[in-house]
Image (cartoon, rainbow, N blue to C red):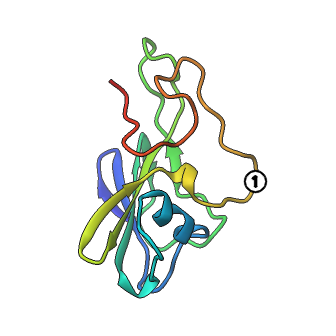
Amino acid sequence: MYGEGLGYQLVLPPNVFPSGIEEALKFARVENPDLSKVSKIIIDYGHVIAENGPVEKGESIGELVKLPAWMSHRWKIGYHVFVWYDGVEIALSPTLFEQEGPEWTCVEWSPYDGEPEPHDYAP
């Protein structure tokens, strides 16, 4: 994990894939995903002060940053999963991947409907 300020990147080692990557790639309209065509996976984190260095599953990566009072949600983490597939960079929502623990919930007052859709960005 490396970064400066409040944004960080977790670079996954070669041939280490998050659970559900094949379904996430299908969601991104990759037909019959072939994991040998994945050259790099990076998870970008924001609104967090992370500790640099290796991390193991289940370990804390740092502390959340308290956002300004005018924001509707002062404690949150933002992140995207970037996958380089067959030479093309694909940005994916973390909600597309399998997880342990509680399910994703849509944040109240969010400009999103809580369901991932291709090219579903806030106006």
Question: Where is residue 30 shown, x and y percent of the image?
Answer: 41, 67
Report the residue at 29% width, 46% height from top. 5
What kind of element bears circle 1?
Answer: loop
* Front in this rendered view, residue 92 or 5: 92
Q: Is residue 16 above or below residue 93?
A: below
> Which residue is farthest top?
70
Judged from this view, the residue extending furthest toward the right is: 101
Q: In this view, does 16 lie above or below 43?
A: below
Quadrant location, the C terminus: top left
- At horizontal 51% and vertical 62% (from top left) the residue drawn is 24
Mark 1 crowdedness (10 Å alpha carbons): few <14, some 14-19, many ≥20: few
Residue 35 shown left or right of residue 96 in the figure:
left
Image quadrant where residue 70 sits: top left
Of all residues, the one furthest to the front in this rendering is 31
State the residue lying farthest toward the left: 87
> Which residue occupies the foreground of this view, 103 or 49?
103
Question: Is 12 drawn above or below residue 6 in the view shown?
Answer: below
Give the residue pinned by disc 1: 101
- Residue occupying the point 53% across, 71% down: 22
Q: Position of residue 37 (x, y in %)?
A: 36, 83
Q: Which of 49 and 111 is in front in this view?
A: 111
Total number of numbered discs in the rendering: 1
Query: Which residue lies at the image location 33% right of the left edge and 48% below the top edge?
Result: 7
Residue type for callout 1 = Gly
Viewer-side residue, 24 vs 17: 24
Q: Where is residue 76 in the image (x, y as percent from the top left)?
A: 52, 35
Left or right: where does residue 64 sit relative to residue 7?
A: right
- Quadrant, the N terminus: bottom left
Q: Is residue 33 above or below residue 118?
A: below
